[in-house]
Amino acid sequence: MAFVTRFAPSPTGPLHLGHAYSAILAHDMARAASGRFLLRMEDTDLERCKPEWDALIQEDLHWLGLSWDGPIHRQAEHIANYNARLEALDHIGLLYPCSCTRSDIRAALAAPQEGVAFNVYPGTCGHRGMESRKPGDALRLNLAAALEHLGAADLSFTETGPAHVGLHRVDPTHALRQIGDVVLSRKGEDIVAYFLASAFDDADQGVTHVIRGEDLFEFTPVQVILQHLFGLPTPTYHHHRLIRDENGKRLAKRDDARAIAKYRAEGATAADIRRLVGLPNP
Ligand code: GLU
Protein backbone atom coordinates (compact mmCIF):
# COMPACT_ATOMS: atom_id res chain seq x y z
CA MET A 1 0.00 0.00 0.00
CA ALA A 2 1.27 3.49 -0.84
CA PHE A 3 2.43 5.52 2.15
CA VAL A 4 1.90 9.27 1.97
CA THR A 5 2.43 11.49 4.98
CA ARG A 6 2.95 15.17 5.62
CA PHE A 7 4.44 17.70 7.98
CA ALA A 8 1.95 20.53 8.51
CA PRO A 9 3.39 23.44 10.51
CA SER A 10 1.71 26.81 10.93
CA PRO A 11 4.22 29.50 9.93
CA THR A 12 3.59 31.60 13.05
CA GLY A 13 7.05 31.27 14.57
CA PRO A 14 10.33 29.39 14.35
CA LEU A 15 10.46 25.59 14.35
CA HIS A 16 11.55 24.21 17.69
CA LEU A 17 12.70 20.78 18.85
CA GLY A 18 9.11 19.47 19.03
CA HIS A 19 8.51 20.32 15.39
CA ALA A 20 11.86 18.86 14.41
CA TYR A 21 10.90 15.58 16.09
CA SER A 22 7.56 15.50 14.24
CA ALA A 23 9.08 16.36 10.87
CA ILE A 24 12.00 13.92 11.15
CA LEU A 25 9.74 11.09 12.34
CA ALA A 26 7.25 11.61 9.48
CA HIS A 27 10.08 11.94 6.96
CA ASP A 28 11.87 8.80 8.19
CA MET A 29 8.65 6.76 8.28
CA ALA A 30 7.85 7.82 4.70
CA ARG A 31 11.34 7.02 3.45
CA ALA A 32 11.38 3.63 5.27
CA ALA A 33 8.10 2.77 3.54
CA SER A 34 9.36 4.07 0.14
CA GLY A 35 6.51 6.56 0.42
CA ARG A 36 6.02 10.29 -0.01
CA PHE A 37 6.70 13.06 2.50
CA LEU A 38 4.74 16.26 1.83
CA LEU A 39 5.01 19.74 3.28
CA ARG A 40 1.88 21.75 4.03
CA MET A 41 1.83 25.25 5.49
CA GLU A 42 -1.26 25.68 7.67
CA ASP A 43 -1.29 29.42 7.12
CA THR A 44 -4.95 30.39 7.33
CA ASP A 45 -4.35 32.64 10.34
CA LEU A 46 -3.58 35.59 8.09
CA GLU A 47 -2.56 37.83 10.96
CA ARG A 48 -0.07 35.53 12.69
CA CYS A 49 1.37 33.68 9.69
CA LYS A 50 4.30 35.44 8.03
CA PRO A 51 6.29 34.71 4.86
CA GLU A 52 9.49 35.03 6.92
CA TRP A 53 8.45 32.10 9.13
CA ASP A 54 7.47 30.08 6.06
CA ALA A 55 10.96 30.68 4.61
CA LEU A 56 12.71 29.89 7.90
CA ILE A 57 10.76 26.61 8.25
CA GLN A 58 11.96 25.54 4.80
CA GLU A 59 15.52 26.51 5.67
CA ASP A 60 15.40 24.57 8.95
CA LEU A 61 13.98 21.47 7.27
CA HIS A 62 16.70 21.55 4.62
CA TRP A 63 19.30 21.98 7.32
CA LEU A 64 17.85 18.96 9.14
CA GLY A 65 18.47 17.01 5.93
CA LEU A 66 14.77 16.59 5.11
CA SER A 67 13.47 16.98 1.58
CA TRP A 68 9.80 16.93 0.70
CA ASP A 69 8.08 15.61 -2.37
CA GLY A 70 6.23 17.93 -4.73
CA PRO A 71 5.34 21.59 -4.23
CA ILE A 72 4.47 23.06 -0.82
CA HIS A 73 0.72 23.19 -0.25
CA ARG A 74 -0.28 26.51 1.32
CA GLN A 75 -3.77 26.56 2.80
CA ALA A 76 -4.18 30.33 2.35
CA GLU A 77 -4.20 29.72 -1.43
CA HIS A 78 -7.22 27.41 -1.15
CA ILE A 79 -9.64 29.35 1.04
CA ALA A 80 -12.26 29.88 -1.69
CA ASN A 81 -12.25 26.16 -2.41
CA TYR A 82 -12.69 25.25 1.27
CA ASN A 83 -15.57 27.70 1.64
CA ALA A 84 -17.31 26.40 -1.46
CA ARG A 85 -17.12 22.88 -0.10
CA LEU A 86 -18.44 23.93 3.30
CA GLU A 87 -21.68 24.97 1.62
CA ALA A 88 -22.56 21.28 1.17
CA LEU A 89 -23.18 21.11 4.93
CA ASP A 90 -25.41 24.16 4.75
CA HIS A 91 -27.52 22.45 2.07
CA ILE A 92 -28.22 19.54 4.40
CA GLY A 93 -28.93 21.82 7.36
CA LEU A 94 -25.94 20.97 9.53
CA LEU A 95 -24.57 24.49 10.08
CA TYR A 96 -25.69 27.43 12.16
CA PRO A 97 -24.30 30.95 12.54
CA CYS A 98 -22.82 31.97 15.87
CA SER A 99 -22.08 35.46 17.13
CA CYS A 100 -20.84 34.48 20.59
CA THR A 101 -17.65 36.07 21.80
CA ARG A 102 -15.19 34.20 23.99
CA SER A 103 -16.56 35.98 27.04
CA ASP A 104 -20.20 35.08 26.14
CA ILE A 105 -19.11 31.47 26.03
CA ARG A 106 -17.18 31.72 29.28
CA ALA A 107 -20.20 33.28 31.00
CA ALA A 108 -22.55 30.59 29.70
CA LEU A 109 -20.15 27.96 30.95
CA ALA A 110 -19.81 29.51 34.39
CA ALA A 111 -22.10 26.79 35.76
CA PRO A 112 -20.78 23.83 33.80
CA GLN A 113 -22.92 20.74 33.42
CA GLU A 114 -21.55 17.62 35.00
CA GLY A 115 -19.62 15.44 32.56
CA VAL A 116 -19.39 18.11 29.88
CA ALA A 117 -15.87 19.19 28.92
CA PHE A 118 -15.18 22.78 29.97
CA ASN A 119 -14.56 24.01 26.45
CA VAL A 120 -17.62 22.51 24.77
CA TYR A 121 -19.80 25.21 23.20
CA PRO A 122 -22.96 25.61 25.30
CA GLY A 123 -25.23 25.88 22.24
CA THR A 124 -26.35 29.49 22.79
CA CYS A 125 -26.84 30.15 19.03
CA GLY A 126 -27.92 26.58 18.24
CA HIS A 127 -31.52 27.62 17.53
CA ARG A 128 -30.50 30.06 14.77
CA GLY A 129 -31.18 29.33 11.14
CA MET A 130 -28.67 30.19 8.43
CA GLU A 131 -31.00 32.93 7.15
CA SER A 132 -30.11 34.88 10.32
CA ARG A 133 -26.40 34.85 9.45
CA LYS A 134 -24.81 38.26 9.83
CA PRO A 135 -21.45 39.42 8.53
CA GLY A 136 -18.94 38.57 11.24
CA ASP A 137 -20.69 35.40 12.44
CA ALA A 138 -18.80 32.14 12.78
CA LEU A 139 -20.36 28.91 11.45
CA ARG A 140 -20.73 25.94 13.73
CA LEU A 141 -21.45 22.30 13.02
CA ASN A 142 -24.65 21.01 14.62
CA LEU A 143 -22.97 17.86 15.90
CA ALA A 144 -26.14 16.09 17.09
CA ALA A 145 -27.75 16.59 13.66
CA ALA A 146 -24.53 15.52 11.94
CA LEU A 147 -24.36 12.28 13.93
CA GLU A 148 -28.01 11.62 13.17
CA HIS A 149 -27.36 12.29 9.47
CA LEU A 150 -24.50 9.77 9.50
CA GLY A 151 -26.75 7.17 11.12
CA ALA A 152 -25.07 3.78 11.16
CA ALA A 153 -21.82 4.89 9.46
CA ASP A 154 -18.72 3.15 10.79
CA LEU A 155 -17.02 6.10 12.48
CA SER A 156 -13.65 4.67 13.35
CA PHE A 157 -9.94 5.16 12.79
CA THR A 158 -6.83 3.09 13.14
CA GLU A 159 -4.10 4.46 15.38
CA THR A 160 -0.52 3.24 15.22
CA GLY A 161 1.03 5.69 17.72
CA PRO A 162 2.47 4.04 20.85
CA ALA A 163 0.04 5.55 23.40
CA HIS A 164 -3.23 4.54 21.74
CA VAL A 165 -2.41 1.80 19.26
CA GLY A 166 -5.48 0.00 17.87
CA LEU A 167 -8.86 0.62 16.30
CA HIS A 168 -10.87 3.50 17.80
CA ARG A 169 -14.60 3.88 17.35
CA VAL A 170 -16.11 7.34 17.71
CA ASP A 171 -18.64 7.17 20.52
CA PRO A 172 -21.47 9.65 19.70
CA THR A 173 -22.36 10.30 23.34
CA HIS A 174 -18.74 10.99 24.18
CA ALA A 175 -18.38 13.21 21.07
CA LEU A 176 -21.39 15.31 22.07
CA ARG A 177 -20.10 15.75 25.61
CA GLN A 178 -16.43 16.27 24.83
CA ILE A 179 -16.39 17.93 21.39
CA GLY A 180 -19.75 19.58 20.79
CA ASP A 181 -20.61 22.07 18.04
CA VAL A 182 -17.16 22.96 16.71
CA VAL A 183 -16.49 26.10 14.68
CA LEU A 184 -16.01 25.25 10.99
CA SER A 185 -15.69 28.79 9.69
CA ARG A 186 -14.08 31.42 11.83
CA LYS A 187 -15.78 34.47 13.19
CA GLY A 188 -15.77 37.35 10.77
CA GLU A 189 -13.16 35.84 8.49
CA ASP A 190 -14.94 33.38 6.22
CA ILE A 191 -11.98 31.08 6.65
CA VAL A 192 -12.59 27.45 7.42
CA ALA A 193 -11.13 26.32 10.70
CA TYR A 194 -8.17 23.99 11.14
CA PHE A 195 -10.23 20.78 11.63
CA LEU A 196 -11.89 21.15 8.28
CA ALA A 197 -9.04 22.58 6.18
CA SER A 198 -6.75 19.80 7.33
CA ALA A 199 -9.39 17.08 6.68
CA PHE A 200 -9.87 18.42 3.12
CA ASP A 201 -6.14 18.66 2.53
CA ASP A 202 -5.33 15.20 3.83
CA ALA A 203 -7.86 13.82 1.35
CA ASP A 204 -6.83 16.08 -1.56
CA GLN A 205 -3.14 15.34 -1.04
CA GLY A 206 -3.78 11.59 -0.84
CA VAL A 207 -2.39 11.38 2.69
CA THR A 208 -2.59 7.78 3.93
CA HIS A 209 -0.84 8.32 7.28
CA VAL A 210 -1.24 11.37 9.51
CA ILE A 211 1.79 11.63 11.80
CA ARG A 212 1.47 14.39 14.40
CA GLY A 213 1.70 15.25 18.09
CA GLU A 214 -0.16 13.41 20.80
CA ASP A 215 -1.96 16.66 21.73
CA LEU A 216 -4.13 16.29 18.61
CA PHE A 217 -5.29 12.74 19.39
CA GLU A 218 -8.42 13.94 21.19
CA PHE A 219 -9.51 15.95 18.13
CA THR A 220 -9.26 13.04 15.73
CA PRO A 221 -12.94 12.00 16.20
CA VAL A 222 -14.05 15.44 14.90
CA GLN A 223 -11.98 14.91 11.79
CA VAL A 224 -13.37 11.40 11.30
CA ILE A 225 -16.92 12.79 11.55
CA LEU A 226 -16.06 15.52 8.99
CA GLN A 227 -14.47 12.97 6.65
CA HIS A 228 -17.71 10.97 6.67
CA LEU A 229 -19.88 14.06 6.12
CA PHE A 230 -17.81 15.00 3.05
CA GLY A 231 -17.31 11.44 1.78
CA LEU A 232 -13.52 11.62 2.33
CA PRO A 233 -11.34 8.64 3.24
CA THR A 234 -10.04 8.29 6.80
CA PRO A 235 -6.25 7.95 6.91
CA THR A 236 -4.35 5.94 9.50
CA TYR A 237 -3.26 8.10 12.44
CA HIS A 238 0.03 8.03 14.31
CA HIS A 239 0.15 10.40 17.28
CA HIS A 240 3.65 10.66 18.66
CA ARG A 241 5.03 11.70 22.02
CA LEU A 242 5.62 15.39 22.67
CA ILE A 243 9.02 16.89 23.33
CA ARG A 244 8.92 18.63 26.69
CA ASP A 245 11.25 21.02 28.47
CA GLU A 246 13.04 20.10 31.68
CA ASN A 247 9.91 21.01 33.69
CA GLY A 248 7.75 18.65 31.67
CA LYS A 249 6.04 21.49 29.80
CA ARG A 250 5.26 21.03 26.13
CA LEU A 251 7.42 23.25 23.92
CA ALA A 252 5.59 26.11 22.25
CA LYS A 253 6.44 28.27 19.25
CA ARG A 254 7.36 31.20 21.48
CA ASP A 255 9.92 29.00 23.20
CA ASP A 256 12.73 30.51 21.17
CA ALA A 257 15.39 28.95 23.40
CA ARG A 258 14.74 25.67 21.62
CA ALA A 259 14.34 27.12 18.14
CA ILE A 260 16.17 25.04 15.56
CA ALA A 261 17.66 28.24 14.11
CA LYS A 262 19.27 28.94 17.48
CA TYR A 263 20.87 25.48 17.71
CA ARG A 264 22.01 25.97 14.13
CA ALA A 265 23.58 29.35 14.91
CA GLU A 266 25.36 27.84 17.91
CA GLY A 267 27.09 25.27 15.71
CA ALA A 268 24.94 22.18 16.37
CA THR A 269 24.51 19.68 13.54
CA ALA A 270 21.42 17.88 12.28
CA ALA A 271 22.81 14.73 13.90
CA ASP A 272 22.88 16.57 17.27
CA ILE A 273 19.19 17.47 16.88
CA ARG A 274 18.30 13.85 16.11
CA ARG A 275 20.18 12.77 19.24
CA LEU A 276 18.51 15.48 21.36
CA VAL A 277 15.00 14.32 20.39
CA GLY A 278 15.89 10.63 20.61
CA LEU A 279 15.72 9.69 16.93
CA PRO A 280 18.35 7.51 15.22
CA ASN A 281 20.73 8.96 12.69
CA PRO A 282 20.37 7.47 9.23
N1 GLU B 1 -0.70 22.76 12.07
C1 GLU B 1 -0.75 21.84 13.18
C2 GLU B 1 0.34 22.22 14.17
O1 GLU B 1 1.26 22.96 13.81
C3 GLU B 1 -0.54 20.40 12.76
C4 GLU B 1 -1.81 19.74 12.47
C5 GLU B 1 -1.70 18.32 11.93
O2 GLU B 1 -0.59 17.79 11.77
O3 GLU B 1 -2.76 17.76 11.65
O4 GLU B 1 0.30 21.75 15.29
Image: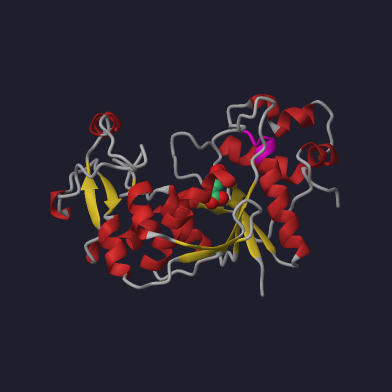
**Nearer the observer, 12 or 28:** 28
Question: Where residue 17 sits in the image (x, y, percent)?
Answer: 70, 36
> Residue 94's spot in the image, x, y percent?
25, 60
Q: Tell me if residue 255 comes above or below residue 270 in the rendering.
A: above
Q: The N terminus lies in which quarter of the figure?
A: bottom right
**Residue 3 image offset from top left, x and y in percent:** 66, 67
* Farthest front residue in view: 114
The secondary structure making up most of the magenta span is loop
78 and 195: which one is in front?
Answer: 195
Q: In this view, does 239 lie to the left or right of 131?
A: right
> In the orientation shown, which residue stands out farthest toward the bottom?
1
Q: Against 231, is 47 above or below?
A: above
Residue at horizontal 43%, vertical 71%? 154
Q: Is residue 78 visible?
A: no
* Residue 261 horizontal side relative to residue 216, left or right: right
Which of the 4 image quarters holds residue 225? bottom left
Relative to 1, 272 lies left or right: right
Magenta span: 14-18
Quadrant of residue 105 within the rendered picture: top left
Residue found 15% across the figure and 50% down from its top: 127
At a point 78% along the width and 27% down the height, the residue shown is 265
Residue that appears at 37% across and 41% down: 117
Left or right: residue 267 compared with residue 160: right
In this rendering, the answer to whether 210 lies above or below 265 is below
Q: Is residue 115 magenta?
A: no
